[in-house]
Image (spheres, helix red, strand yellow):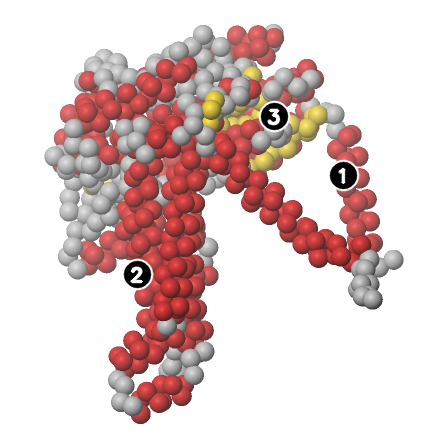
Amino acid sequence: MRISPPRKPLLLSLQPYLLIAPTLLLVLMFNVLPAIRTVNDSLYKPARGLNAAGKPPEFVGFDNFRDIFDPAHYMGARFTRSFRNTIVFALATVGIGVPLGLMLALMLQHPQPLLGLWRFAVFYPALLPLIGAASIWSFIYSDSIGLANAVLKSFGHPGVNWLGDRNLVLMSVIIINIWKQAGYFMIFFLAGLQNIPRDIYEAAALDGAGARQQLTLLTLPLLRRTLLFVIVVAFTFAFQTVEQLQALGEGGPADSANLLLYLIFENISERRNWGYVNAMTLVLIGVVLTFTLSNFLLFEREESDR
Amino acid sequence: MNIRAVAVLFALMALLLLGAAQAQDDIVIDFYFPSATANDAEGIFQRYADMFEEQNAGISVNPVFTGSYTDTRNTILTELQGGGAGPDVAVMLSIDLYSFAEEGYIVPAQQFIDAMDMGDAYINDFFPALLANGADEAGNVWSIPFQRSTPILYYNADLLAEAGFDAPPSNNAELVEIAQALTTEDRDGLLVPVAGGFPIWMYQSFAIAYGQNIVGDDPTEVYFNSPEAVAAVEFLRSLGTDLGVGPAGGAAWGDTPTAFLAGQAAMIYHTTGNLTRILSGADFEVGVWYLPSGPAGEDGTGYGSPTGGGNLYIFDDGSKSQAELEAIWSWVQFLSSPEIQADWGATTGYIAANATAWETEPLASLAMQYPQYGVARDQLQFAAKEFSSYATITIQGIINGTLESILTGEAEDAQAAMDAAQAQIDSILAEYQ
């Protein structure tokens, strides 16, 4: 005769679900439902014209997506430009910021005089609120009274219009983000470096490996997981941090430095553009997912190859 | 009973008491205001609210600071679109009228003016140019002028005198002549702040001087690709290129007065809202004059600057009682009264909106002491409507983007860029015709 295990009291079997219920509810309310609504609303155009407040939206299929990719359309002209800027911005901040963070970590990992001061100086920008940092930089970049041009002028250069020149303004914004994030990435790399046992290097040195070989054959492979983490975080940052634009000419002139999330924010207040805003949000989510997943897959595959 | 339970109990009691205190006041007016100047707007409005409550028993005013003009507009739109209560009265840009009227969130002030004993005298005391943006095409007044401004020419009188000019420029030709004479290695002759997101305002003054405001009375019409509108932007662009009196692409808004005060610019276009700051910050003689007239005519028709600044809006979706609406209107009337306008104008530098305010202290003696304040007021006779239409936010975005791409040299062919913009604008406005 088999003895069935004693039945748990109902409350006890429900306990795990009750425990996650508050979190689940919040995730449903603030993440899942809005996401579903975004998908749904991206297929509609809101009522437009006089007294539109009470009128129902109109189903338009994928028209919103067609419009935002059409450079002759008023929203498409801004979207295509901001889309391109966002990709450039992400590639530049990650492509320069992450190696820079790694370089700083390698330079500041060994005991040396004033180590704490150096590390703090490099990490300090990460502590500033981005909007505050951007406000400070807007003074540095100022055309007539800014520090950047004062330095250029002291070398005999006439100075440049950092935030007014359409060819420079995106670069000016990228510089701020790299300056702000490199020190933050450095902290992760420093932690990663601490986890690599010293004796491996000693063994490598005995085998005659030079500093460069130690870096490429030991440090970088052993930092792989940290690197993946930092790159994923850096890409997420690149797509999410746009508040600096508020202090730096709002993405202008003529959207030369505008980024997707800021464009979405700029257009949210007028009802007529809600369909576009939802469509743009979906495209942005698609881009972020693509970048993040491809990072994971790339690293996973290399892991399994080993 | 543990400490936490006691704390919760106290909090509940406090809430109940608050509710009771609230209920004793008959009517509470939620008043949202932005601040575009560095003045202590919160302190000033609290003082006004206290004065008002003293005169009006049973009404209390709750002033809420809501950031910049854009923040204020977006805050209110978000609240109302989400089904929230929103403010009862708010200061918003005078050009925000259609953004709120087309959604049905605000009510015209006209009905309250009509119900007044001296309604005509009240509204006719305002400078007509300042009423242009607050009224619809049928002439109904929706919003009441409160903190208004116009662009104006500031010049460094000492520098002009040194170079032998004893009067400010009165037309574009003189403007260029003086600006070129005063441009040096480390000084710009003329700064027009059109860089940095909002060129439309300064641009409009050139369009008007060239003879075609880009907007008329009808909110479904925009005239952005007319020959005059194109010539105006080409002149504006040439200031930074061929004429070489300022930076290519124009100056940034915030840098312009700073550069002027530092002696790095001989003349600037800027808002009258900065008059107080510039007068008190300059160590040279500051001259103020009308924006120079353009090809449209030297007889006054070629002058012209748009108006700017904020109006008082009344919010009601039809749910407010007559008593509430009357209380709201009395607060609007209070803020637009000559006494408050004189005080507000003298404190901030905004142009007091009604004629009587200029005969009221403290503004009357201030205008006597500094004639510069009067220039801003007198220019109002040539001032025109600021850009506003249906779908204002979107269309203004199109115009700003187009102007920026022309001014920075990205779009070399101004006419083509403005034709394309006009086509986009017309397709949007077609939905309202």
Residue indicated by mark 3 = B88
Q: Is residue B66 left or right of residue B379?
A: right
The outermost residue toward the bottom is A206
Q: Residue at x 67, y 54 (%)?
A: A20
Q: Is residue B76 above or below residue B122?
A: below
Q: Residue at x 19, y 18 (%)?
A: B227
Give the letter of the chain under mark 1. Answer: B
User: Which of the two discs, 1 and 3, labels the residue nearer the N terminus?
Assistant: 1
SS of the residue at dot 3? loop
Q: Is residue B339 visible?
A: no
SS of the residue at dot 2? helix
- Could you say which is closer to the camera, residue A244 or residue A70? A70
Q: Is residue A212 visible?
A: yes
Tell me where residue A9 sits by quadrant. Answer: bottom right
SS of the residue at dot 1? helix
- Could you say which is closer to the camera, residue B164 or residue B130? B130
Q: Is residue B425 left or right of residue B84?
A: left
User: How far apart are the alpha carbons under marks 2 and 3?
Assistant: 51 Å
Tell me where residue A73 sits by quadrant. Answer: top left
Residue indicated by mark 2 = A96
Say which mark, if any, is on residue B18. Answer: 1
